[in-house]
Image (cartoon, grey):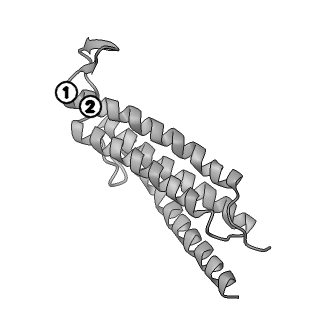
Amino acid sequence: MRPENLSAAERSRILAPAAGLFGLGLVIGLVFTFEAIGHVAAWPLLPALDIQMPGTEAAWRRTHLGLLINAIAMIAFAAAGASIRLTQGARRWYIICVCVTGWSNSLGFLVGALFGVRGLAFGGSLTNTLNYLLFLIAVPTAFAQAWLLWRGARNTRLEAQA
């Protein structure tokens, strides 16, 4: 099967989840702000509400930035899809890996902020183990998407030389 660029429809299968992740990152930015100021305040939309957020300011900062960076990375991988040439099966795996990496890594940040865990080692509490597993899922998919990006770029270069 001849390698092809990701079609617009295939790239949109990455961009739609990336947009959702970016939006969630913006919402988490509000939570980070509320944690930083110590209460919920969005005058004139909301009066000041004495609601304590779970987690720490540092955890919410990591989560906010982590979600935005993962979303931007997904957008970059989608854009790169227009320039790389992969077989149909490889394009399908590329899309899956980009989406799974972005979302599982981001959900790891969110679980960490909500439950005060880091997920840096397996075990401990159930939430720490969940956090660890979410980050762990992102590792092989990140390497796979990087390899597929390289392979697709190599295919493009080889076709241009031929």
Residue occupying image coordinates x 32% and y 30%: 31
Q: Which residue lies at the image location 36% right of the left edge and 49% below the top edge? A: 123
**In the picture shown, does residue 52 fall above or below 46?**
below
Q: Is residue 34 left or right of residue 122?
A: left
For label 1, the SS is helix
Residue 84 lies left or right of residue 28; in this view the side is right
Residue pushed farthest left? Answer: 37
Say which residue appears at 35% left-offset and 41% top-offset. 64
Task: Classify the position of the N terminus by image quarter.
Answer: bottom right
Q: Can you identify the residue that label 2 sits on?
A: 33
- Residue that carries the numbered disc 1 in the rendered image: 37
> Total number of numbered labels?
2
Badge number at residue 54: none
Identify which amino acid the numbered label 1 is placed on.
Answer: Ile
Return the x and y of residue 70 as percentages of the image width and height. Answer: 44, 51
Is 33 on the left or on the right of 3, as rendered? left
Residues at discs 2 and 1 in contact (Cβ within 8 Å): yes
Judged from the image, the secondary structure of the residue bearing numbered disc 2 is helix
Q: Residue lying at the far top in this picture: please name it.
A: 47
Give residue 72's position: percent from left, percent from top. Answer: 45, 51
